[in-house]
Amino acid sequence: MNAMDHVRYLAEHIGARGSTTLEEKEAATYVEKRLTSFGAPPTTETFRSARSAWLPAALFWSITLASGFVFLAGGRLRAIIALALAVFGLVSILLELLFRPNPLRWILPKGDSQNVWARIEAEEEAREHVALVAHMDTHRTPLVFSSRTWVRLFERLVPIGMGFAILLIVIFAVGIVLPMPILGAVALGPMFVATIMLILMLQADFTSYAAGANDNASGVGVALSLAEKLAKSPLKHTKVWIVLTGCEEVGCYGADDFICKHKRDLGNAAWISLDTIGSFRGSPVFLSQETFLATSKSDEGLLDVMRSVATAHPELGAREIRMKGSYTDGAMGFKHGLRALTLESHQQDGTLSNWHQPTDTINAVFPECIQATESLVFEFLQQLDRNVRPDPTQSSTG
C-alpha cells in the first residue's frame, strides 16, 4: 500500500475523526493493523484528553465577561473580586496556550484517546533515534476557519481580544484605588469584545468535524508508508519510532503523553512531525520555527540536514519557512527538549489548503505533494543515518 491508500481509507472509509471520538479510535485500530502487517508490532497506549480546543477559550471569555459584570455592580470589594477573576482567567488561558497544566484543563470535560507506536530497530548498533510523528484526529470546521478572510480576521481578533482583556484588568485595578463611575462605562468596551469572542468560541463547538484528508490523514499516510519501507530495509545505525498520536487538535495531548512515558528511552531523539502535507497544488515545507503563544525553534542540526537534502533534490520543491498562529506536535518535542523539526505543505501563497474546513476531503489532496514529502523524509533519514558517527568508546580490533 502507498501513502494515498492510507489517506483514502482514513478520510473516506472512516471520515471525520474528532478527538476522543469512536472514529479516532477506529483510525487507531486501522493503524495497528497496518503496522502489524508490515512486521512492526505496534503498542497502543491510552490517555485522558480534553474533548475540545475551543472550550478552554470559551471558559476564559466567560470568566472575563463575568468579572466585568461583577465590577459594574460597584464597590471596592466587587472590584477586588472582579480583578481576581480576570487575573485567574488570563493566567489560565496563557498557560493553556503554552500547553501547561492549568485550572481550565482541570475542570473541562475529558475523554479517552490513544497513541499507537512501533519501533523499527537499526540494522546494526543504534546510535541515533528518530521519531516520525503524525496525528490521527481531525479538527472541527468553525466559522473563523471558513475562508481566508475569516482566518486573517481571526488572527487579528485574538491579540486584540487579549489586549482588551488586559485593559479590563487595568480598569479593575484602578477601580480598587480610585473608584470612579466612569470606569464602568469604560469597561463596557472590553466586555463587548469579550462577548464577541465568546460567541465565536461557542459557535466552533457546534460545527462538524472535518474529514481531515490533508489534516492529517496525509501525515499518517506518509508515516505508515515509510514504516513499511523501513521495516523491510532498516537504517544501519538509526532506530526509528513510528508514533501516531491522538488529540493533537485539542492541545497535543497525545504527543505530550507519549514523550512523558518514553522520554528515557527516546533520549535525545530527533522528533519529526508530519502534519498537513498534502496541500492542493502545494509543495513541501520544513519549519525553522513555529509560533503559537511561545516560539518553538527547530533543531539547527536537523535543519542543516534537511537543507542539504532539499538542495540536493530541487525536484521535490522543498523550502524553509517560519509559521505563526498555529501549532503542531512538533511543539511537544521542543517542550520536552527533543530535537524537533516539522514538515508541512503550503500553497504558493503560503497558506494551508482547506485547513479546518468541510472541504478537507480526498478530492482536495495533492498526491504529488504527498509523494514529494515522503521522498524528502526518506532521503532525510538516509542522510541522517549516514551522518551518525562511530561510538568513540569502542575501539576497532583487527
Image (cartoon, rainbow, N blue to C red):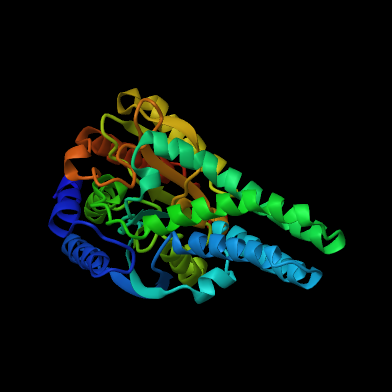
On the image, the x and y values in percent for residue 236 come to 35, 51
Query: Which residue shows up at 49% across the image and 61% down it?
Result: 58
Q: Is residue 50 left or right of residue 23?
A: right
**Count of marks placed on residues:** 0
Q: Nearer the viewer, residue 124 or 376?
A: 376
Q: Is residue 46 left or right of residue 307?
A: left
Q: Nearer the viewer, residue 290 or 52?
A: 52
On the image, the x and y values in percent for residue 237 come to 40, 52
Query: Which residue shows up at 26% across the image and 54% down it?
Result: 227
Query: Which residue shows up at 86% across the image and 61% down it?
Result: 177
The quarter of the displayed image where residue 84 is located? bottom right
Q: Is residue 150 left or right of residue 137?
A: right
Q: Is residue 115 left or right of residue 26?
A: right
On the image, the x and y values in percent for residue 347 come to 34, 30
On the image, the x and y values in percent for residue 187 come to 68, 53
- Tell me if residue 295 can be seen: no
349 in relation to 171, above or below: above
